[in-house]
Image (spheres, rainbow, N blue to C red):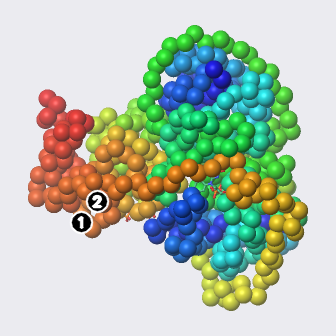
Amino acid sequence: MKIVVCVKHVPDATADRTFSEDGTTDREAVDSLLSELDEYAVEQALRLSESDADAEISFLTVGPDDARDALRKALAMGGDAAIHVSDEDIEGSDAFGTSLVLAKAIERHGFDLVLCGMASTDGSMGVLPALLAERLGVPAVTHLEELAIEDRTVTGRREGEGATVRIQGALPAVVSVTDRSGDARYPSFKGIMAAKKKPVETLGLSDLGIEAAQVGRAGARSAVDTATRRPPRAKGEIVADEGTGGIGLAAFLTTKKFI
Amino acid sequence: MAEILVLVDHVDGAVRKPTLELLTLARRLGEPSAVFLGPGADSATEVLGRYGARKVYVVDAPEVDEYLVTPAVDTLTQLAERTGPAAILLPSGPDGKEIAARVALRLGSGLITDAVDVTAGPEGPVTEQSAFAATYQVTAHVTQGVPVITVKPNAAAPEAAPADPVVEKQDVTFGPASHAVRVLSRTPRERGDRPELTEADVVVSGGRGVNGAENFALIERVADALGAAVGASRAAVDAGWYPHSHQVGQTGTQVSPQLYLAAGISGAIQHRAGMQTSKTIVAVNKDADAPIFELADHGVVGDLFAVLPQLVDEIERRRS
Ligand SMILES: Cc1cc2nc3c(=O)[nH]c(=O)nc-3n(C[C@H](O)[C@H](O)[C@H](O)COP(=O)(O)OP(=O)(O)OC[C@H]3O[C@@H](n4cnc5c(N)ncnc54)[C@H](O)[C@@H]3O)c2cc1C
Ligand SMILES: Cc1cc2nc3c(=O)[nH]c(=O)nc-3n(C[C@H](O)[C@H](O)[C@H](O)COP(=O)(O)OP(=O)(O)OC[C@H]3O[C@@H](n4cnc5c(N)ncnc54)[C@H](O)[C@@H]3O)c2cc1C
């Protein structure tokens, strides 16, 4: 089984993230790393490979030069090889530009299973897996907390709105997994050393037959008008409980008309 | 005025509140047409009309319940081709976002997800989004095709604007993608007597500090005293103290109530991402340095097992 895991390199969510003047994410300002939610997709791929001797796992990212770090991290966790699509013209892509590049790279490589995270931790749209399935013309078995593959069929549990659903689709398919699908492993020292020897292929738009105008800011179908920092919340009143904290809280809630 | 297609979120015909918010927003942009999938349209028409739907398009086909997401994609795409709407609005959420993305791809349209406000602009709808754990406010607009926008719950207060909707049954051709992912079973979550997390005006949440499933009864008591929904941090959910459907945060539910009470929650960035835009925030935590206090309008540094029972008693005393 040929597995492609899509991983995104994102600004550290625990740092103070900012926008550049042009309304895109400022990638200089803070450290970036493998999106934590994509570690769950990496983990599921590695677990699937443990019961399938023929499994071959490649990691795929679309992003600037340093996005390679996300691939190294994934390769340190396991897997066989990686593909890095990087091209200046991709900068400023919307969900359609990014999904086009990913889909072309996946098609070029070949796949039985594409694994994604539930959402990135920066854009956090949670739509790329559905867009990839639509572009590749395969089932989207998404947002899974639990999954099993048997007889080339993916079955999983999706926590939907108001209901838990069990869903099923045939391979080849796109699958996305949530942060409840199982804790991701830490790379071992051996894994980190081994990762340095695993092949990373670098591709540009021309390798994928994509025109510059189809992606990047030129191809984007939406535009950011303004990005402004929300004013910090006004400093509140913090009191130490000296036996009447609950009464004081009730008094506050009364002034706000909640009681 | 142009039509605005609004995908109705309902449970067997009982329309959920976010749909009323979408209809309210849609009226700023044009004339709302509700798109109703599955059985139960008869009981939904009245409320859809009350909130301004001029038309209700009904697609009641077995595919809708038997397959995931794609039947709604076929429906909205074909209705958009027939009616030429000025925008398509859907509720944010895993289903709504996936439907929206695929519809936009098929229509050659731009997509905006998780809008917290939508207004009419000179070049079509202008959206507001919260970004980076709600530390940024972003305004954007779609530059290509029919704007497809998913809207978060609580983006607008539903306002009635009674209309007498025309109900039209629509036939849709379901392509192969509509038969790709089968729904084997659907287990509706138990709905207690408390308000739903996304719809509640008040949310009372407990975290690791609650220290045990049995202690969540205290959080529930506070919630009931305030007519609130119950929330939980991921630490509390992961420990198995409260169901995941109550998790507030980046990978849980994002709420924006009038009042958010956090008890025994430290205020990690991923939790803040789900509650930072609440109007009023209060916190009880025994650690004076807990980051949650940076957000709190009123904070009590103390033991929640002392503060919360006293709060409930005082609420009851003030009410009687
Ligand atoms: C704050 C913010 C708001 C935005 N709003 C919009 C908007 O409303 N409309 C719009 O069209 N664009 C928007 N964008 C741009 C959009 O986020 C990017 O185009 C992005 O490439 C796709 O969306 P995502 O990161 O949200 O991915 P998601 O759909 O959340 O990602 C899901 C999964 O897809 C895979 N994946 C995503 N990106 C990559 C990648 N580059 N390489 C490899 N795998 C990947 C990962 O497995 C990931 O877990 C926004 C960006 C930001 C930062
Ligand atoms: C990718 C990713 C996604 C995530 N998504 C989410 C999410 O959606 N939602 C979420 O909540 N988290 C999420 N997290 C986890 C998040 O980082 C934190 O670990 C989590 O929010 C911590 O929960 P907590 O505040 O309850 O626990 P802790 O951080 O352990 O805080 C417990 C607090 O309780 C206080 N306390 C203890 N006892 C008492 C007492 N008796 N009285 C008063 N106070 C007391 C302590 O002082 C402490 O501040 C995510 C993490 C990652 C990496």
The answer to which image quadrant residue B56 occupies is top right
Q: How crowded is the residue under tag 1: few (<14 C-alpha within 10 Å), some, or many (20+)? A: some
Which residue occupies 63% across, 69% down? A9
Image coords of residue B319 (percent x, y): 16, 31
Q: What residue type is labelled 1?
A: Ala
Classify the position of ligand 2 by quadrant: top left, top right, bottom left or bottom right. Answer: bottom left
- Respond yes or no on whether mark 2 lies under 8 Å from ligand 2: no
Q: Which amino acid does label 2 sit on?
A: Phe
Which residue occupies 59% across, 77% down? A186
From the image, tell me which residue sits under label 2.
B293
Q: Can residue B67 be seen in this view?
A: no
Which residue occupies 56% across, 36% down? B121
Secondary structure of the residue carrying tag 1 is loop
The answer to which image quadrant residue A187 occupies is bottom right
Image coords of residue A130 (percent x, y): 73, 49
Secondary structure of the residue carrying tag 2 is helix
Q: Distance between the residues labelled 2 and 1?
A: 8 Å
Q: Which chain carries label 2?
A: B
Which residue occupies 22% across, 35% down? A257
Image coords of residue B122 (percent x, y): 59, 35
Question: Is residue B109 toward the left or the right of residue A37 in the image?
Answer: right
The verdict on a common chain for dots 2 and 1 is yes
Mark number for residue B288? Answer: 1
